[in-house]
Amino acid sequence: MFENLLSRPNFMTFIILFIFGLTIMVTHHNLIKKLIGMYLLQTSVFVFLVNTGAKFGSTVPILLSAGGSIEPSNYANPLPHALVVTGIVVGVSTLGVSLGLTIAIWRCYGSIEEDEINERLE
């Protein structure tokens, strides 16, 4: 099983990015570090979606001529790639809003550490 995973470096990249992102989000108390972990987690999901949408020997799903038979197995599915592009836009927007909220938290509480913010809230 381990040899099978090593033969698929794209899948290993997904696993490593996912684990790093999740670990950073859970273990760190700094809000900026949590946002970096969230972004790594999003990137790992994008890598996974692109890899599932790729097919060896396929072509783009654009029909050049109306005549003849069409074999669906010859074409790649464009949906995962379109979802990834949409996800990237949403992810960057979410990151920008989150950074803005982090700046507002820092201005209000004077810190971006979760523990210090929770102490001031109590």
Image (cartoon, rainbow, N blue to C red):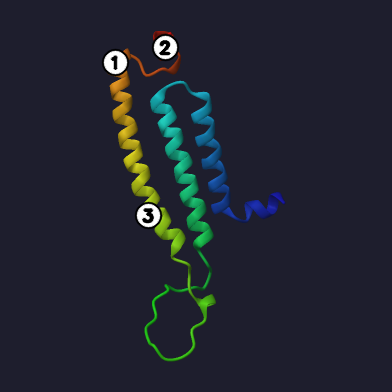
Residue lying furthest front: 122
User: How many neighbours does mark 3 have within 10 angstroms: few (below 14), some (14-19), or many (20 or more)?
Assistant: few
| Front position among marks 3 and 1 | 1
Q: Which residue is mark 3?
A: 85
Q: CA distance from mark 3 to mark 1?
A: 35 Å
Q: CA distance from mark 1 to mark 2?
A: 12 Å
Marks 1 & 2, CB-CB < 8 Å contact: no
Closer-to-camera residue (58/3): 58
Question: In the image, what residue occupies the spot 44% across and 29% down?
Answer: 34
Give whichever of discs 3 and 2 has the lower sequence position. Answer: 3
- Tell me the element at label 2: helix
Residue 108's mark? 1
Question: In the image, what residue occupies the spot 40% across and 59% down?
Answer: 82
Quadrant for the C terminus, please: top left
* Amino acid of disc 2: Glu
Residue 22 sits above or below residue 113 on the image = below
The picture quadrant where one finds residue 97 is top left
Give whichever of discs 3 and 1 has the lower sequence position. Answer: 3
- Tell me the element at label 3: helix
| Front position among marks 1 and 2 | 1
- Tell me the element at label 1: helix
For residue 66, side relative to residue 9 (left or right)? left
Q: Which residue is mark 2?
A: 116
Question: In the image, what residue occupies the spot 41% across and 12% down?
Answer: 116
Give whichever of discs 1 and 2 has the lower sequence position. Answer: 1
Residue 66: x and y in percent read 39, 88
Residue lying furthest right: 1
Residue 28: x and y in percent read 48, 23
* Amino acid of disc 1: Cys
* Amino acid of disc 3: Val
The picture quadrant where one finds residue 84 is bottom left
User: How many neighbours does mark 1 have within 10 angstroms: few (below 14), some (14-19), or many (20 or more)?
Assistant: few
